[in-house]
Image: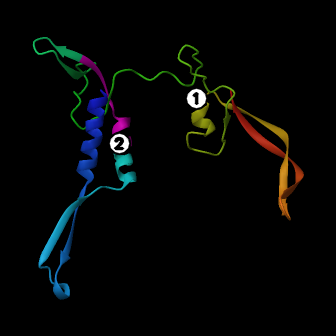
Amino acid sequence: MNLHNNEAGRRSIRSHMQRVCKCHGMSGSCSVRVCWRKLPQFRQVGDSLAARFEGASHVKVVEKKRRRIKKLRAVSRDLKQPNKTDLVYLEESPDYCERNETLGILGTRGRLCNRTSLGLDGCRLLCCGRGYQTRVRDVEEKCRCRFVWCCNVVCERCRYKKEEHICN
């Protein structure tokens, strides 16, 4: 599986490479033209692989009896067989929302989340649809720090209320 996915990644990079040429010559003439292939932007490769990751194929390893060659095949005949550019996986991922001590998964109950974020830290995603509670705590921390000549930093203590959101 890893060899297959590594090759799929290399193919993705190759497919996004661009041909770049430069001309050399007197007063703008193109007497010698030099061309090379340029690697794509890292973001472009990442976006391409992320899209392939979302559509990765669930496979199993099948051993050909005569030649002892191992092949990757879709787990069901109803599913499309993976090609050389598809990403594949052998096992379903565990449920990270629920605690599972055998697998070392802590779950998301009690985790702090960001109420306004649509990202991975957002309450809608992180709390797995269970909702969240909001609490307000008093926080005291150093503030308005300043450097006092040779080797001292002097700070005041500031108190404020902080709103936190915790997954149910």
Depth check, front residue: 5 or 35: 35
Residue 151, given in percent of the width and then of the height, sits at 83, 59
Q: Which mark is residue 128?
A: 1
The total of numbered circles placed on residues is: 2
Percent from the top left, x then y, of residue 11?
24, 43
Give the position of the C terminus as an image quadrant. top right
* Residue wearing tag 2: 49
Marks 1, 2: nearer the viewer:
2
Count residues near mark 2 (Cα–Cα under 10 Å), then give few for <14, some for 14-19, many for 20+.
many
Q: Secondary structure at mark 1?
A: loop
Question: Which of the marked residues, 1 or 2, is nearer the chain's N terminus?
Answer: 2
> In this rendering, would 40 be left or right of 116?
left
Residue in the picture at 71% in, 32% down:
166
Q: Position of residue 79 (x, y in %)?
A: 26, 24
Residue at the image position 23 percent from the left and 28 percent from the top:
80
Q: Is residue 63 above or below residue 133?
A: above
Segment colored magenta: 50-61
Q: Residue at x 23, y 22 (%)?
A: 73
Residue 52 within the magenta-colored segment of the rendering:
yes
Kindly report the distance in space between the C-alpha atoms of the residues bearing marks 1 and 2.
25 Å
In magenta stretch: residue 39 = no
Horizontally, residue 23 falls left or right of residue 163, namely left
Looking at numbered disc 1 in the image, what kind of residue is underneath it?
Cys
**Residue type highlighted by circle 2:** Leu
Residue farthest to the front, as pictured: 150
User: Relative to 41, is 27 above or below?
Assistant: below
